[in-house]
Every structure is written in structure tokens, then in C-alpha cells.
Amino acid sequence: MLTSFFGKSKPINFIAVVLFMTVFYILANFQAIVSSFSFPNLSAKAGVFICYILSVPVLDFIAKKNDLTKRSAFKIVIFAIFSVSFLAILRNDAVIVSNLCVLLALRRIISLKSQKDVQKKIFDATFWICIASLFYFWSVLFLIVIYSGILLHTSHYFKNWLIPPVAILAVSALVTGFNIIFYDQFYTFSTWFQESSFNFELYQNPQLLIPLSIILAVAVWTVFFYFGLLQKANINSRPTYILVLLTLLVAVGVALFSPVKNGSELLFFFVPLAIIASNYFESKTERTFKEILLIGLILMPILIPVFF
């Protein structure tokens, strides 16, 4: 039974998920690598692949360290399934790197509940979001999550509200200095900014529409379950649950304002959704349905390209 296999967090689960992601990443990028084969291109793709795989242990660490889920592998397998369901994600180097940076920021934001090294965590989180925005501009919206974390955990200390602008200025100085040294020019807003597009024509393609419809159905189903957990959560855990839901909403905003609507913009959405859906799969109810659902989700990225 797959739910029993992924219901435990063991090295074999991690290996299975990584192999699953590796196969799809190679298949998605094989033609591009072969057609323009060179050591720099191969090295760049290898680096992006490492960032993609690193997203799994970082997500797992965030969930376990902050008690967002139980000790299971559901979150990483769900993230893997959803991310490989859109080949545009696996071919978009910028969004993969940016997503890892957002994950590193989220790790610091959620850990604010410990009330330890608060100012350092706020600075680090803002720093990572700014780095993420250099690769994918609209990930800058995750600054909303940082300020929400401050509001929920450390709003009583006014200086904490001033730390994000300091971190933003620090990144701006570093990027400007780098560009002046290596390119002899300033890094301008026009270079950083990516204009939004609201053209959803590509979503008419069944290879995008079908997996997106299934994932949205899973999202609606599991978010309602997550709201139940939020209501039952104690006063110390509730802000963390709220931050996960807020991250999901901000990820929707990032997808809506993204410059290209080809499925790659959905990667940010899959991180909080994996945590939320994992809580549903870890529950003791509807075991048969969850088994069927998990099998169907695993088959989804395999069968849809075959039939469509």
C-alpha cells in the first residue's frame, strides 16, 4: 500500500522521490541538453537540478522542525508529483532557483515562533526573498509573508519592522556592486522588473488544463481539512498554520502576475499545498479513498503525456 509506504519518513522514501524527480527532469531537458551540448550548459543544468532536488530536504526540514506535519514522506512525494506534472517547470531554470530561495526564506519566517535570533531570521528571510526576485521578479510578493510573520510573532518590537528594508538595501548594494565590477553598468529597475501577462491561452492545452484541474480539486479538498486543523490548533501553533495558508495565497498572486502562463509559475504554489495536503493524507480517515487518490496522482504525470 502506497499510503503505508509514504506514511513513514525513511531514507528509502527520500531516494524513491529523488529518483522519480530525476527521471522526469532528465526527460524534460534531454533534448535541450543534447541539441546545445557544452560544458557550461551542462554545468548550469546540473546546478539547477541540484537546486530542484534540494527543495525536497528543505521542505521536509521545514515541516518536521516546525511540526507542520507528522513524520511522513507525503509532503515530499506530493511536491514531487505536482512539480513534474508540468514540464515547463522542469525547463524553467529561473523559477526552480527562485523557489529554493523562497523555501529558505520560509524556513526562517516560520521559525520566528521560537522567539530566538528574531532579527537575524527576519534579515535572512528578506535577503533570500530578494535573491529569489532576481531570478523571478514576482516572488518579491513573498515579502508579504515576512511582514505577516513579524505581525504574528514579534509585532511588539518596532525595530523588527525596519529590518526588511535594511536587507533589501543590502541586496541592492551587492547586486549593484557586482554589475559595476563585472559589467561596468548599474543594475536598473527595468532589468529587475518583469511585466505581468494575463494571457491564459496556453491553459487550453490538455497537458496543462487536466493536471491543473486535478491539483486545484485536491487543493480545495485538503484546504477545507486544514481549516479544521487550524480551528483545533492551540494558540502557539495557530500563527504557523496561518502563515502556511498565507503563503499559499501569495503563491496564487505570484502565479497571476507572472510574465508567462505556461505552468512554470505554479511551482511556488506547490510548496504550501504539499504541507496542507500532507496533513490530509496523514489523517486516519478515508484510507481507501486516500490510497486511490495517491495512486491516481502518481500516475497523472505519467499518463497525461501519453494520452495527450
Image (tube, grey):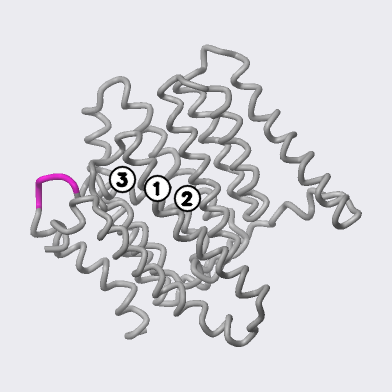
Residue under label 3, please give it. 276
Along the viewing direction, whichever of 262 and 23 lies nearer the viewer: 23
- The x, y position of residue 121, in whole percent, is 54, 29
- Which residue is found at the position 29% from the left and 65% from the top? 16
Neighbourhood count class around disc 1 (C-alpha, 10 Å): few under 14, some 14–19, many 20 upward: many
Mark 3 or mark 1, earlier in chain = 1
Label 1 – label 2 distance at C-alpha: 19 Å
Residue under label 1, please give it. 59
Residue under label 2, please give it. 252
Tell us which disc is closer to us: 1 or 2.
1
Mark 2: which amino acid? Val
Helix, strand or loop status at disc 2: helix
State which quarter of the image contains the N terminus: bottom left
- The x, y position of residue 5, in whole percent, is 17, 59
Helix, strand or loop status at disc 1: helix
Along the viewing direction, whichever of 133 and 114 lies nearer the viewer: 114
State which quarter of the image contains the C terminus: bottom left
Label 2 – label 3 distance at C-alpha: 15 Å
Question: Range of the magenta residues?
Answer: 282-286
In this rendering, would 192 be left or right of 159? Answer: right
The answer to the question of whether label 1 and label 2 lie on touching residues, with beta carbons closer than 8 A, is no
Label 3 – label 1 distance at C-alpha: 12 Å
- The x, y position of residue 303, in whole percent, is 30, 79
